Amino acid sequence: MEVRSSYRGQKIIYYQRSLHCKKKKKKTSIRQSHSIEHIKVATKSNIFKCEIDTVEKKMPEKYIREESMIRGPKFVVRLRSHTVYENSAIKLFCTVEGYPTPQVKCYACFCRCATDDTAMYTAVASNTHGQASTQASIIVKSKTFSPNIWYDLKTSHERQELFCCFSDAVLPEIKYTKINITFTETFDVTFGKEGDKATLTCKMTINPNLANLQPEAMWYRDEHLLKESRWVKMESGGGVAKLTLTQLAKDDEGLYTLRMVTKGGDAVHRAYVFVDDGPPPVPQAPGAPMDIKIHDANRDYVIVSWKPPNTTTEGPIVGYFVDRCEVGTENWVQCNDSPVKICKYPVQGLFEGHSYYFRVRAVNSRGIGRPSRMSEPIPMYGLTLGEQFCVHSGVPSAPGQVVATRETDTSVLIQWAPPKDPNNLIGYYIDSCVKGSKDWTSANHKPHKQTRYVLQKMKLFVLRVQACLACSSQSKTLSNGEDQLKQSVFSTELPSFPYDISLLYCDGESMVLNWKQPLHSGGADVTDYYIDKCNVAKKTWKEVNVPPIKETLHKVGGLTAGSVYQFRVYGANLTGLGDASTPSAPFKCEAWTMPEPGPAYDVTFTEVRDDSVVVEWKAPVYNGASAITGYIVEKSKKGSDNWSKVNENSVNHCYFKVKGLETGESYGFRVRAENTNGVGVASTPSDPVCIKALPGTQEIKCGIDEESGDIYLSFESCQMAEKSKFVWKKSYQEMTDFSKGIILKTSGSHSTLLFKNPDKEDLGTYSVSVTHTDGASASYKMSAEELEKMLALSYDIRNPIIPLKTELAYKILERGRMRFWLQAEGISSAVTYKFFANNKKLVNCEQTKMSHDAATGIIEMVMDHFTDDSEGTFTVQIQDGRAKAQSSLVLIGDAFKAALAEAEYQRREYIRVKEGTVANLKKDSVFQWYKDDVEVISEVPADLNSGVCKFPLTNFSKRDVGLYKATITDDRGQDVSQIDVSGKAFDDIINELSRVAGSSASELSIQCTAEGIMLQCHMKYYTEEMKIHWKQKDSKIAASERMRIGGNPAMATLEMVEPTDKDKGMYTIEIVDPEKTHSRTLDLSGQLYSITPDTLGGPALIYNYIPKINFVMFSLSDRGKVVGGLPDVVTIMEKKTLSLTCTVCGDPKPLVSWSKNDQEVEPSDQYVIAMDSGKFASLTIKGVSLEDSGKYTMTVQNKYGGESVDIIVSVYKHGDRVPDIKPTPSPKRIMPPTVPIVIPTAKSATPAPAAAKSPAPPQNAKSSAPPRGMKSPTPTRKK
């Protein structure tokens, strides 16, 4: 190869002589150390050697200006990649420039390809000012390819390697400049405590150390990329990468990874960082919570979530406290008064525009623990920072058994099964305890997400695993999953070998094999299988599968027709690969063409009893020349070769119950399939089974649940292991679909199938078996006759009837009250009942009082007012538990008239006897009224001649509560009558008023006010004691400064101050009385109606029944407003200049005035008042003095109204301490318009009813709206 270079445009020529590629044999090995031949590939060990001659062409002095030409090397023409065949010549060209003249070197990075000359070549040019590089790939392809090479390869893996060689040669992988990074010093496993500082440092050498190709240092914690923050500091450069954890917290615990990344690859180092709990504020207090997050940040609230700390010797956590701290201060404020039970809490009462930190503290019976790491600052701008948060209830169930594997002298790998009921599981805590001790210590301080963990081992110890939930205050500790780890002794072993390999089918190119599971699993489930094959003629074993096989059935392909093969199988569990099975019998690869079926397989047994057993099998893979019509089962005693038929007639299903067996004898079973062409070959015999029932064996019980009426099949196992599971089958086919009214419930050693709505499809044989036992199993056949009987019993349980002694009857009581009653045979105290009159449900109140007596079984209702409207049918419905009853009474026609006449007669008699009028008076008799023993004057004079005296209570409210007395006095003495208007009597009056108001309420209407709009509902009577609710879009409206709820005796009102688009929607007023809820609605959505100067004039009143009006909003958007810029408090040193400036708006332009201590400020040399551009108002005070301290008020107003804002100014002397005046935000005061504002009435508007109309306020009057946060007072009653 030649290299030529020239100044200012050096030309470099690489010349490669003809490449000669030769092939050589290469050997490799597979499992069991059996050698095979690999591909014969030509190799070549020559590496290009470059001789570089630099030729400098001198240029005239007049063209050389050295200072301006000093620069680093630069490739003007870069190397270009080439693909050639063997024995071809190749030239590589590139052009480089720079001053001083660059020195050129050649690097070669060889790829894994078919020939050694295929590689990535690099040219590097350097001078004193830097270096540059260029790359090109050379691909050398073989001209010839022998087909015999393909057939010399024995395995698919070898052929895949050959394919990869040639495919890589055609499309090579692009390689970058190889930069070798070697770590000289690394960080080890680090232990620290909360609050400590930890630094992880790695030193390294970089070769070549190229200035423009420096590696990038990337740090990870548990595979999550770390970024710079107040808790994490990173440094990199000069062959050193450093990570500093400024203040350790439990959140910092994890596996730390340093990746030095280059374009050609990366170098990686990992080590674990453990963080222990810091000293608790109180002994035995819980640790700090972790992973604090902020969700749904809004203007005035956020949702804080966190993860619970691990608890070992500490008491259980009873709750959490959430603290907040405003950014810029160090004052932490507790947000919740009592501990919150779940790991989530909404923090309210925040201020918009402020930023906050948050932290969490855990609480147990000993006290409050250390706080968590505080969150990042969260601004309150109404932005959604997190996802929607959902509260989940419940805690995870216990993880499975802890198993130790891969044990070394210093560590051990433990594994466990995940919980059966995860309940939103977020991870695990691993605890260790020295054998013989009860002191549990935590191995990790943050939830571990995987079900395996590497534990540093120092002593003989016991382990346990806890599962924790995101929204639970406490983890659930495993109670039965503890496992002792012993030095050099594993709790699991390798499985034994599979056996009885059989051939199920052969098509001339492949074979279907079946085998039996290992007899001993080694303490863990055998989940994987691997197969080797051997061509008997070649006596070479080769692996069949690389991915594991999950079943005991596999189709082996790629076989040679006519060859004879043997197979062997390996089983594997989580510990590793077991021994190989005994080689199978030789199987010849010939296609099966026999007309009879092939063998059945997987012959097993279940339900072993003292004289019977159930045999199960799977259908043959090969059916023969016709479909399979049945199966024949054969038996043989253990040790005998004599097989006899069990069933004379074949069965058409894959199970059979063999009866008449000898107790204690061992039998083997095999199965033959038959079709119309004959009986096929026998299956591989089953393992011998001893005909003897397990001690304590129980059968399946069928019954009916006495509470729900569900039909059930229940089984209790006589044996149970930790991994045992109940497998239910129908017709000996496993049941997996439980969505059709069948529910499976398992608790301990009991398992139950519940049939919610059984039918004919549920008929059949049900069986159950328990895994990991000695064969605990049973079966039950459900027949049609039995199902019919159970359905009848189920109906009676689900629909019981309460027997009645008497049907519903009536009896007329004094005062004309009507008593409806019946008597049942027996009822409990929890009985419920409903009375109906003409299909209308009656409520239990004073008018219809209901009661029952459980001792006598009597249920009754007393109707206080039996009138003409009561004619019809009366019904009572009774329910006592699930039992029900119903009875009706018809009162119409003559029967009703007779009952009504009797009721009216009793009412008149009661009035005549009990309720007399004022009588037996003299001329000098004096009548007086008293309230709480204080005489009061009635608005209606007493009429003693008529015998009736009244005391009207207008505008009834709580002020009228008291004891009222009426007295008549003359020379014969005094007579007194009194009534207590309080308690129940007061509530009854309010309820009656609510009924009257609700039935008379008009539709909602709208009226404009000086500050917004008012919704009105006119009614006969209103008082604030009535139960009245205002709602917007089904959400109850609370009284506030913006939403003023009130009214007067003629109507209820809701005033919205300065309404916005958020106030759009459906508004509802609800008036509640004991019988029903009266509601009126108004839709305030759609088009906005704005106010313009053209709408000024008369009174402003808009009613909601204007056709096609969806939303009416009166917004004084054009009034004078203070947009912002003024502070609440100003402190300034005397003799300084104070400038108060803000932005104002309004249309027309508002007038601005200033006042000090409610006295108007007049412009002068010291006080300068200005208005720039019609929107920037300012007050400048020159040379302020102590007398200038006080309250300054700025007022902005135009004809549509305005606002006023207060500013507190405090002036202090030079040298004095700055006064500490805390700002007290004062709301802007809204000023009413100076002229009336009118919204034009639509053409279809109809005035409100006269009875409900409220008088319009007089013009130029101030707004009569109540202050913000206060209800409108009820007018005082006239005397």
Image (tube, helix red, strand yellow):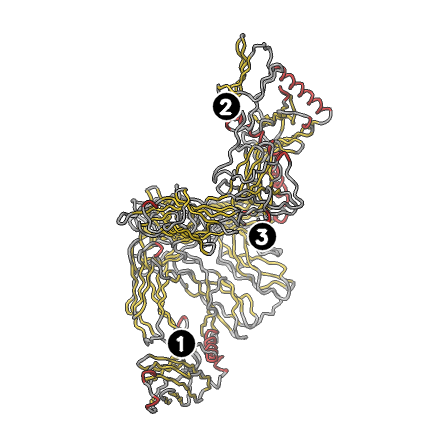
Q: Residues within 10 Å of mark 3 (few under 14, many from 20)?
A: some
Q: For the residue marked with disc 1, what is the amino acid?
A: Tyr
The local secondary structure at tag 2 comes to: strand
In the depicted structure, whether residue 644 falls above or below residue 342: below
Would you name the residue on which mark 3 appears?
A: 731
What is the x, y in percent for residue 671? 56, 59
The local secondary structure at tag 3 comes to: loop
Which residue is farthest right? 894
Which disc is residue 818 wearing?
A: none
Would you name the residue on which mark 2 appears?
A: 962
Which disc is residue 176 wearing?
A: 1
Residue 1265 located left or right of residue 1221: right
Q: Which residue is rendered at x = 62% and y = 20% of the image? A: 815
What is the x, y in percent for residue 190? 30, 59
Q: Residues within 10 Å of mark 1 (few under 14, many from 20)?
A: some
Which residue is farthest top? 972
**Is mark 2 in CB contact (under 8 Å) with mark 1?**
no
**Is mark 2 in CB contact (under 8 Å) with mark 3?**
no
Q: Quadrant of the N terminus?
A: bottom left
Closer to the eye: label 3 or 1: 1
In the depicted structure, whether residue 216 falls above or below residue 329: below
